[in-house]
Image (spheres, rainbow, N blue to C red):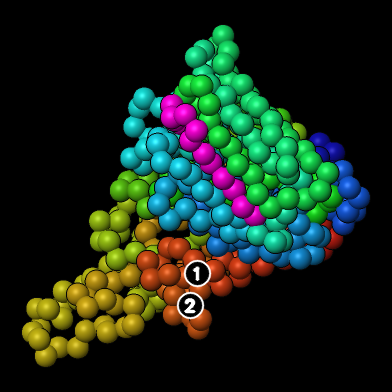
Amino acid sequence: MPLPLLAMLAAAATPCQTALCQADTLQPYFDKLAQARDHTEGNHPVHILQIGDSHTAGDAITGGWRDLLQAQYGSGGRGVMAPGRPYPGYLTYGATASMSAGWTVKSTFGAASAPPRPPIGISGFSVSTDQEGATLGLTADATEAFNRFTICALEQPGSGSLTIQFGGTSEAFNLNAFAIRSECKTVRVDQPQYTVQVTTHGGPVTITSWATFRDAGGVVVSNLGVSGSQLVHFARTDDSVIAEELRSYKPDLVVIAFGTNEGFAPRVEPGQYEISLRSQLARIRRLVRNVPILMLGAPDANTRNAALANNAPGAAVDCTTQSQTLADVMATLRASEEAGAGAQTPTQPELDPTGRPLFAPPGLAAVREVQRRVAQELNIAFWDWQARMGGACAAAKLVKASPPMMRGDFVHYTKAGGWDIARMLQTDLAAAANGTLAGR
């Protein structure tokens, strides 16, 4: 066998151990980003579209990434969002959404996911109403002005229509059709605007997503997350809706950011998780076609829920002392209790008043291991989020940082923490684009 082929096979068999693996697959995105500073009117911005769970929905990390890229390349608009205000506390950094009374929300996960539900697209949500004159509105911040607005909805028999008021113009979007199908309508104006309003008329309507862009170069980062969801819940979305949305939104990079909820499941079976992961990755690849994909590995996160201590093969990582196993900590606690109230107990800062230890469930490590291996085998870019955070028990440290980088749940990030994770991600991507990252 020729030596170069032997070398290639050996490299393929060796797991990538760097923070960013298979970075060469992102070259089409890097090439487009290199042109993002061309702010000629009419140039589409570079569009990053991320789907995921609450880390994505909360926009702490994607918002930081958006800030970094737009400071360097310019703003291309706020991007794709779930329509209206799909749940209480919904955040849209860079824009403010409004929704009148009378809308029904459906999603891929949570209470709003109960059937029946209409076909749902890339945002993971839909909003529907049969009320005449119901409205949705969007107001952009000063930095996210836009001259292109797109809204995607379902055409079906008996549907009503939408009126889109944007930039001094008013356009109708008729949704009555012979069969159910997804349709996206785009309205462009000459000058950047800050507001758009959508009003319903003449019958029921269902909207699956909307987006704002500024066609003058720059970068857009769209964050489409459903809190509590796993990648398997993304399977509840509809291929035909997503295909129409992708045709209209034209992402240049698709980022997949699931894994935390998978790792916190009551029981993680690595083999079953791998089947689900491969299935959804194949589906996403088919839908996005030649668009590069970046998968973010499951981050570090910690818990005191003892029910998760054995939720997967392997041992939980103790984050109380960060040196003992969880079994050792529990044994110490039991010994202290048996010895009486005067005995010493491991009173580390991570112990709560009940003495429950803090740990990283083994399910997270199992999920992360499968993600890394599958990404390599499918030649999909992979970023080791946990390693860049600082490794095992990084969440415990980030909660205690000054200022705090993670919230007290040891799972979610503060705005400062999200910005820091975004900086790490962008540093690794920039290094790969410059050809300086080892293992590229």
Find residue 239 and report its image quarter. top right
Could you say where residue 185 lies in the image, as x and y percent from the top left? Answer: 68, 29
Residue 290: image location, x then y, percent: 75, 34
Q: Could you tell me which secondary element the residue under label 1 belongs to? A: loop
Task: Please tell me in which quadrant of the rendered image residue 18 appears.
Answer: bottom right
Q: Nearer the viewer, residue 302 or 38?
A: 38
Residue on which the image places disc 1:
414
Q: Nearer the viewer, residue 274 or 254?
A: 254
- Residue type at mark 2: give it: Pro
Q: Is residue 213 left or right of residue 207?
A: right
Q: Quadrant where the C terminus lies?
A: bottom right
Q: Which residues make up the magenta segment?
A: 128-140
Tell me the distance, in whole angstroms, between the alpha carbons under discs 1 and 2: 7 Å
| Marks 1 and 2 in Cβ contact (< 8 Å) | yes
Residue at 48% across / 77% down in the picture? 404
**Residue 246: horizontal and vertical position, in percent?**
67, 33
- Tell which residue pokes out farthest to the top in this image: 178
Q: Residues within 10 Å of mark 2 (few under 14, many from 20)?
A: some
Q: Which residue is mark 2?
A: 404
- Which SS class for mark 2? loop
Dominant secondary structure of the residues highlighted in magenta in the image? strand
Say whether disc 1 or disc 2 marks the residue closer to the N-terminus: 2
